[in-house]
Image (cartoon, rainbow, N blue to C red):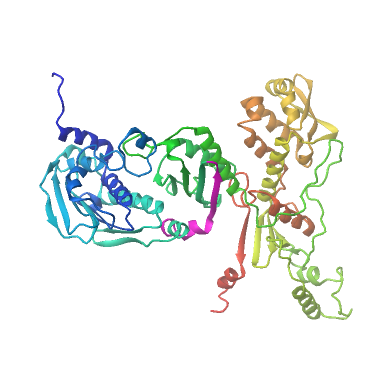
Amino acid sequence: MPIQLLPDVLISQIAAGEVVERPASALKEFLENSLDAQSTDIAVSLQQGGIKSLRVADDGIGIPKEELALALARHATSKIASLEDLENVASLGFRGEALASVASVSRLSLTSRARGERHAWRIDADGGQYSALQPAALEGGSIVEMQDLYFNTPARRKFLKTEATEFGHCEEAFKRVALSRPDVGFQLTHNGSAKWRLPSSEASKRIGAVLGTEFAAAALPLDEQGGALRLWGMAAKPTFSRMGRDAQYVYVNGRFVRDKLIAHAIRQAYQDVLHHERHPAFVLFLEIDPALVDANVHPTKTEVRFRDGQAVHRFIFHSLHKALATTAGTATTAAPLIVAETASAPPTPAFQAQPYPTYQPQIPLRAGEGQNFYETLFGRSTPLPTGTSEGATFADIAVAQAVQSISQELPQDFPLGFAIAQLHGVYVLAQNKQGLIVVDMHAAHERIMYEKLKTALDAEAIATQPLLLPLSFHADRLEVATAEEQGEVLADLGFEIAVLSPTTLAVRSIPAILADSDAVALARDVLRDVREYGGSRVLTERRNELLATMACHSAVRANRSLTITEMNALLRDMEATERSEQCNHGRPTWFHLSMADLDKMFMRGQ
């Protein structure tokens, strides 16, 4: 076959394969055109998931009569006129392909009334064949309607899915655009039934309306500025993680994008606090000088390319990492759980005793310890309340203690309150001003130790604690070789592991902060990671995984009995530790039940 020029209709149908994958693709293009036309209210109507009919009506500036036919022509646009415009494009559309592509594979009508015009005009397209202009009735703005998508390309039509599936894609495209412009009102109906009504509002209200109240309750506000970059929006706490990526929205200069560089930066920011294979939820807006980003990468315009990708990556990572670095409550000044030691300092207990007030003796709620409950609570082993005689009954003592308890108000600066008991050696129960706090003591302490280890390693100041008696253990040859070859790396991590024989190692020093750990088990895990990934990787890209393992060894174990003072010390340290709402694996470390929640459980006041 000789080389020949293709007909314009066929060229448009080929281009439609990239631009119009399904009805949702056309809907996205129509909505973006409406936003570019300065619309303040947009109504979308679908029939059969958009396959039978897709209609978008707006109140924008409209299209003049003399430009209406040109709007359906290929590569005709009002958005750019030169290469300089293309390199600084700020509009959502600019390629001039969408309407022509849709018109070539459907029956399309475009009605518009420009501001100042006496009446509206309409043009129809049937598979790329255009009608003459006709007068029409329209108060203002534009209406574009697509019917029978792919009626003239049946092979493409077979690739469309069921009505429910196509509507799902259209609804997602609708939500993406609605999130990008909270100042614009949106409506969506399907088969005559209203699905969405979103009046213009603030960004936080629009995000809550689209993603739901649960997301809004778990979301952290974010607004960071750095040079020519600004990142703002809402990012959900790791405890609101999802099984899929269905709640992830990123916008660059108002345009929804799926960018690998941005996705990697976000994933790294959540890496420290997200549980296993869960996915974070967020709505983030990146504002950048249009000259520093190229949106002309793909016809769908969902991919972008940055002039300085590394700077964008660092900015997004640090901004989001900072927003996620919340403490358990709002306290910023609290005594540390472990006092920093020098290399020669003696080991300290896992919890440093602190003079925090105790409002009630620990109630023994563990199994088998409830028989002497009243003796523990009101027994003579504890001082009698002020003004109580020796002959007082248990009821007298209870009343007196209740009066004293009421007169002692909890301080406002301790959001996690004060410990009252330990449940089954696993959970710490505490009360604050609002109600009950339940803490997973192992998970909470694990996060605290992890953050301390990270801080110490960053400062190259992991203090070592020599063991009173070195602990020897049987080792395989790979472990022995690792101890010999990676001595400097181990020393940087606070370990001294000596080779006693070809099959024996001895632990002589461990990090002082991990003094209460099983030294041999800890040394084995560290040696395994250093052997598997190499010394340089362990101290760089694998650093956090190794420190998380070390922190897990040092965290208090289940079934360990803690005193009230130790439990309060744990609570204070949680309040002072970043990201302490999740353990190193992304699981929550504490929950709060307000008095209203408890009243509802017991139907008080009902």
220 and 493: which one is in front? Answer: 220
Residue 318 screen position, x and y as percent: 58, 42
In this rendering, position of residue 462 left or right of residue 177: right
List x then y, in percent, for residue 559: 72, 52
Residue nearer the viewer, 580 or 301: 301
User: What is the quadrant of residue 334 in the picture?
Assistant: bottom right
Vertical arrangement, residue 381 with respect to residue 222, above or below: below
| Rendered location of residue 168, percent (x, y) | 32, 51
Q: Residue at x 58, y 47 (%)?
A: 586
Stretch of the chain drawn in magenta: 209-227
Q: Residue furthest front?
A: 116
Q: Quadrant of the N terminus?
A: top left
Q: Is residue 220 part of the magenta span, yes or no?
A: yes
Q: Is residue 5 magenta?
A: no
The residue shown at (43%, 36%) is 291
Instruction: Find residue 590 and report its horizontal and vertical position in percent.
Output: 63, 56
Residue shown at the point (20%, 57%) measured from the top left: 117
306 vs 358: above or below: above
- Quadrant in which residue 75 is drawn: top left
Residue at horizontal 19%, vertical 60%? 138
